[in-house]
Image (spheres, grey):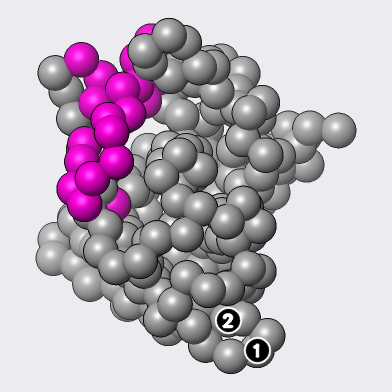
C-alpha cells in the first residue's frame, strides 16, 4: 500500500515532494499547504512516517511516537534494527523516536487496516474537529500562518490478535495559555463492534488569537476550495 509513496535506497529511505503530496491528498485527505509539492518549505506528512514504521516493524500492543524533526525531499531516513526503543534518523539528527511494548504482530491485514483508518482519522481533524474545539474557548488559529505541529501519538491495544480494526472519534481536548496551546485528539479502536484499544494524537498550536466567525468561515471556505481544486483524479 505504501510503496508508491517512498523510495528505498541501499541504506536509507527518501520521500519526494510528489510522493509526500500524493500521500497527503490521496490517502490522508490532508490539504495542509506544507504538503503541496511546490510548497516553499515542503514537509512530508508525519502520518506517512508513522505508516512506514508500522509497515516495517509491525503492530505492538503499546506504541509511542514522538516527532522530533521534519522530513523534506532531501531527508535520508535511516531505520535501525528492531528494538523496544529506537530512533529514525537523518544523519545525526533524530526525526522520530519510537517506543514499543508487549506482543507484536506483522499481519499485513492488521497493518494496512490500522494505517488506513488512523490516517483517515488524522486527516479529518482539520478543520472539522480542531476549529470547533478551539472555538468552544473562543479562540482560533492564525489564518495567515496556521501553525499546528504534530508532536506525538500513542496507541494501546488489548491484543494484536485482530485483523481489521476500525476507528471512532473519542472526546478531544484543548488547553492553552497566551498564544500557545495543546490539542489532544482521542480515538477508540473497534473489532466487530467491540473496543480493543485506544489512542491519542498530540499537537501543539501557536499564534492563537481571539475567535472571529467571519474569519473562520473564510478559512473553511479556503480549505474546501483547495480540496476541490487539488484533489487528485
SS of the residue at dot 1?
A: loop
Specify start and end residues of the magenta stretch as a single range: 64-91
Depth check, front residue: 158 or 148: 158
In the image, taking residue 85 as reference, residue 198 lies left or right, namely right
Distance between mark 2 and mark 1 Cα atoms: 5 Å
Q: Quadrant of residue 104?
A: bottom left
Where residue 210 sits in the image (x, y, percent)?
31, 63
Q: Residue at x 50, y 17 (%)?
A: 8
Q: Determine if the magenta segment contains residue 73.
A: yes
Q: Quadrant of residue 178?
A: bottom left
Q: Quadrant of residue 179?
A: bottom left
Q: Residue at x 73, y 32 (%)?
A: 230
Classed neighbour count for the residue bearing mark 2: other residues with Cα under 10 Å, few (<14), some (14–19), many (≥20): some
Q: Determine if the magenta segment contains residue 11.
A: no
Whether residue 135 is visible, yes or no, is no
Depth check, front residue: 27 or 111: 111
Depth check, front residue: 201 or 193: 193
Q: Quadrant of the C terminus?
A: top right
From the viewer's perspective, is residue 100 above or below residue 147?
A: below
In the image, taking residue 13 as reference, residue 2 lies left or right, namely right
Q: Residue furthest bottom?
A: 194
Where residue 129 sits in the image (x, y, percent)?
51, 68
SS of the residue at dot 2?
A: strand
From the viewer's perspective, is residue 47 above or below residue 186?
A: above
Q: Residue at x 20, y 15 (%)?
A: 91
Mark sitting on residue 190 = 2
From the viewer's perspective, is residue 2 above or below residue 185?
A: above
Per the image, the residue denoted by label 1 is: 193
Q: Are marks 2 and 1 in contact (CB under 8 Å)?
A: yes
Q: Quadrant of the N terminus?
A: top right
Amino acid at each position: 500500500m505504501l510503496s508508491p509513496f517512498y523510495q528505498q535506497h541501499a541504506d536509507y529511505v527518501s520521500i519526494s515532494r510528489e510522493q509526500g503530496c500524493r500521500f497527503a491528498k490521496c490517502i490522508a485527505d490532508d490539504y495542509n499547504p506544507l504538503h503541496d509539492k511546490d510548497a516553499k518549505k515542503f514537509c512530508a506528512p508525519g502520518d506517512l512516517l508513522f505508516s512506514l514504521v508500522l509497515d516495517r516493524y509491525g503492530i505492538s500492543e503499546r506504541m509511542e511516537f514522538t516527532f522530533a524533526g521534519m522530513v523534506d525531499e532531501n531527508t535520508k531516513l535511516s531505520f535501525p534494527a528492531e528494538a523496544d526503543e529506537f530512533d529514525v534518523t537523518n544523519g545525526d539528527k533524530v526525526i522520530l523516536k519510537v517506543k514499543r511494548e508487549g506482543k507484536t504482530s506483522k499481519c499485513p491485514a492488521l497493518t494496512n487496516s490500522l494505517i488506513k483508518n488512523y490516517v483517515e482519522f488524522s486527516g479529518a481533524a482539520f478543520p472539522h474537529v480542531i476549529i470547533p474545539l478551539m472555538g468552544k474557548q473562543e479562540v482560533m488559529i492564525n489564518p495567515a500562518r496556521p501553525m499546528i505541529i504534530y508532536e506525538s501519538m500513542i496507541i494501546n491495544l488489548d491484543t494484536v490478535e485482530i485483523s481489521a480494526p476500525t476507528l471512532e472519534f473519542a472526546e478531544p481536548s484543548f488547553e492553552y495559555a497566551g498564544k500557545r496551546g495543546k490539542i489532544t485528539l482521542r480515538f477508540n479502536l473497534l473489532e466487530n463492534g467491540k473496543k480493543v484499544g485506544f489512542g491519542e494524537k498530540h499537537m501543539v498550536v501557536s499564534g492563537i488569537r481571539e475567535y472571529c466567525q467571519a474569519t473562520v468561515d473564510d478559512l473553511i471556505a479556503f480549505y474546501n476550495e483547495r480540496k476541490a481544486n487539488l484533489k487528485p483524479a
